[in-house]
Image (cartoon, rainbow, N blue to C red):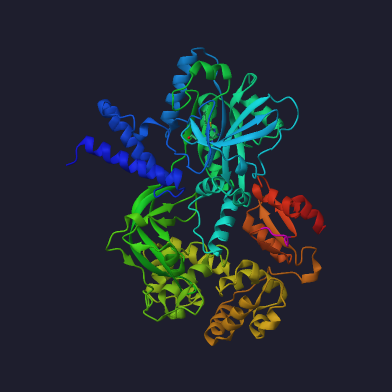
Amino acid sequence: MITDAQRIAHLRTTIRQHNHRYYVLDDPEIPDAEYDRLVRELQTLEADYPALVTPDSPTQRVAGQPRPEFQHVRHRLPMISLDNAMTDEQLAEFHQRVATTLGNSDPIRYTAEPKLDGLAVSLRYEKGILVQAATRGDGTTGEDVTHNARTIQTVPLRLLGEDWPEILEVRGEVYMTRSGFARINEHLQRNGQKPFANPRNAAAGSLRQLDARITARRPLVFCGYGWGELSVAPGENQYAMLQRLATWGIPVSEELQQVAGLDGCRDYFVALEQRRDALDYDIDGVVFKLDRLADQAQLGATTHHPRWAIARKFPAQEELTEVQAVEFQVGRTGAVTPVARLRPIQVGGVTVANATLHNLDEVIRKDVRVGDTVIVRRAGDVIPEILRVVSERRPAAARIVELPRQCPVCGADVIRPEGEAIARCSGGLYCPAQRREALKHFASRRAMNIEGLGERLIEQLVTLDWAREPADLYHLTLEQLAGLERMGAKSATNLLAALERSKSTTLARFIFALGIREVGEATAQALAACFDGMPAIMQAEEADFIQLIEGIGPVVAAHLVGFFAQEHNREAIERLLAVGIQWPLSVLPVSATPLAGKTIVITGTLSRPRDEIKDWLQRQGARVTGSLSKKTDYLLAGDAPGSKRDAAQALGVQIIDEADLAAMLE
Ligand code: IVH
């Protein structure tokens, strides 16, 4: 048994080590959520044993040690931190405290803005000129990063306008956009250097470069959210003051808003959390500040944080857990993919028990071993991923992951061609896993759209050997189907009707449904637009000829030719045509429509389901793709088009709505 006093001592040592790694080395070992838990545990214990609190406890000062190489800067007004609210109740308590102190019945107005995940910086302007930039450091003393901050494009070297105070200290956050972070990490990796763990570390590491030329090459951004020393009084409220900063050229958050009362705070929080993943920068919560500066003054501050502001934090997206096993799954094209089985853990409110590892190269690059402690990240709907291994916690018995020689499902050899990241089961459609995946793909919504033919059912059909290939689906009988698990006569009848309906489709869907490697929807559309039927495509034996089709390169062409060269694939197609699959709806003659050959991206909400519109556009000969590029001809934008609209504008892609489309086709 360890005593509370021992636990306190242990926590202090651990937290100090983490502080050092985080603030001095820019190389944290554990996720923030884990760190916060350690600090909270220590705070709770210290609250229980006030006599054990020592001045050198990490709870007694704001962490952060200036690096010896930088000049130190003493902040004229301390840079204090923020208090956190992890739950709605804690936010309500904050609001209640504010209301009680202010004591009047007026509705309380707050400003709301994202809590940016970067590092706090103070910019000092004298007579409108940037004279000093300093990091927060321990809150009293920071590091002089003037040379580095001067390289950040969004930091004005000279303020705009004239009505600025002679002395103006702007406080704000330096951070890195997600796209910038991806770019820089790719660059570092290409040059054999260690990538940054996340955009925040990248921002910290970049700003605190002794060589400002390196900082200059890093995509850093500054956003102002407050102020320090001012030679004149700042006006009446927070919001107006930030807007004045903006008129002087200081960037402030596009998301900054005034909100009313606790309800206003909650609404803002919910709305921003929903958009969190769509932003191009990491945020870890929302900061609410009392808007009236007189009210702020009345509430005052502790040495650690103001009593007039609070950070309502989002649930953490990164957590620590353990890799209990690494298993291999076999996909539709035989790709053998490692999947980590994790000790189940809550991440951002959802239990995570598996994470994909993509391929063996990734396992090697991340050096993931069975038994390792890893940091898992789950963002929005994205599949959970292992960010990295906490190598300090690797047990001696950790086991290296090896590619199986035989397919774990059918036992056929696993082959990994020279220079390729992906290993494949050589069993082809003899492998039940590949067969199952191929059928799932065939039946899926964007392929043949066979309603009611889900994963479970396909699994049973494959196990019973009733469906070896897609055409078999169309030979299933009512008696067979009605006898399956979770199936009655009614659903069996419905399924047969759905199968019947699916026989009328488009050529593009049919080609896509075949599941030829690298042939996605866009390629299938391109093929459908150029050939007038399956026999014609199957006869195109020359890869060179297929490559003449826009959007089809040598690799895809080779896969196509290879696919059709195999007798069993041709036979499978013949059998499908024999059950009566046809495309009455397929393309018009290519030259006949103004959309023929145009590349279109769809965004926002349209008058009809997106798939329907997509099919219709394809029948007009258009190519519908998912992502914008310079080659895109039109962005078809519905309601709430989101960031694609801005991207299209930036790329010079013409933006049209449904009415424009109708007009074009007149
Ligand atoms: S205000 C006196 N506003 O959060 C109030 N801070 O956890 C001081 N941060 O050190 C901070 N976004 O680095 C404020 N919109 C925002 C912020 C923000 C990020 C950071 C800042 C601060 C830390 C405290």
Residue that protrudes farthest toward the right in the picture: 666
- The majority secondary structure of the magenta stretch comes to loop
* Magenta-tinted stretch: 628-632
Quadrant of the snapshot with the N terminus: top left
Residue 228 percent location from the top left of the image: 57, 27
Instruction: Report the quarter where the C terminus lies.
Output: bottom right
Q: Nearer the viewer, residue 559 or 277?
A: 277
Residue 408: image location, x then y, percent: 36, 74
Answer whether residue 448 is magenta in the image: no
In this orientation, which residue lies closer to the viewer: 546 or 7? 7
- Image height check: is 666 above or below 415? above
User: Residue 358 location, x and y as percent?
Assistant: 46, 65
Q: Relative to residue 83, is residue 543 drawn left or right?
A: right
Residue sitting at x 64%, y 28% = 242
Q: Say which residue appears at 66% left-offset and 39% top-offset.
A: 155
The total number of labels drawn is 0
- Residue at (77%, 71%) from the top-left corner? 590
Q: On the image, which quarter does residue 46 sit in? A: top left
Q: Position of residue 66 (x, y in %)?
A: 47, 39
At 65% across and 48% down in the image, what residue appears?
643
Q: Is residue 631 magenta?
A: yes
